[in-house]
Image (cartoon, rainbow, N blue to C red):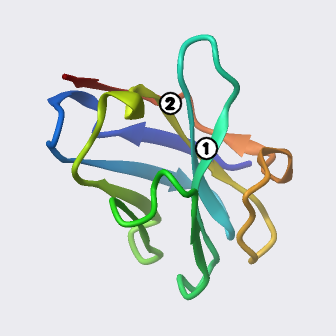
Amino acid sequence: QVQLVESGGGLVQAGGSLRLACAVSGRAFGMGWFRQAPGKEREFVATINLSGVRIYYSDSAKGRFTISRDNAKNTLYLQMINLKPEDTAVYYCAARFSAAESMRPDDYPYWGRGTQVTVSS
């Protein structure tokens, strides 16, 4: 069984930064960050494979967000800079048994409860 706990969300002004963390208990290989804004579907943000070599971002995240992982600490990170009001959402980390990364939510059987990110204009 894999358990994921996100932290690091909060209220920040536009242009600000936040660093999200996801503590992982159990074995998890490919991981990802997703987000869901009110009234919208959950959307892909970033994904990373087990070794941390293969990384993909959504178009909205490219150049502003950085996904990383520390396997020794069993922690996944999402560094976000130059935040915009449209980044406001609940951010979720997700894990899968495959070592590969994936942009598809359906590929992830394990999810955290999410952490709220609110960006004010």
Numbered badge on residue 3:
1
Element on which disc 2 rests:
loop
Q: Are marks 1 and 2 in contact (CB under 8 Å)?
A: no
Element on which disc 1 rests:
strand
Q: Quadrant of residue 112?
A: top right
Seen in the picture, residue 87 relative to 108 is either above or below; the reply is: above
Q: Residue, x 81% and y 46% (percent of image)?
A: 109
Looking at the rendered image, the disc whose residue lies closer to the viewer, 1 or 2, is: 2
Q: Residue, x 53% and y 82% (percent of image)?
A: 52
Seen in the picture, residue 54 relative to 93 is either above or below; the reply is: below
Seen in the picture, residue 21 relative to 74 is either above or below; the reply is: above
Q: Residues within 10 Å of mark 1 (few under 14, many from 20)?
A: some
Q: Is residue 117 found left or right of 37 in the rendered image?
A: left
Q: What amino acid does circle 2 point to?
A: Gly
Image quadrant containing the C terminus: top left
Q: Is residue 2 found left or right of 6 in the rendered image?
A: right
Mark 2 = which residue?
114
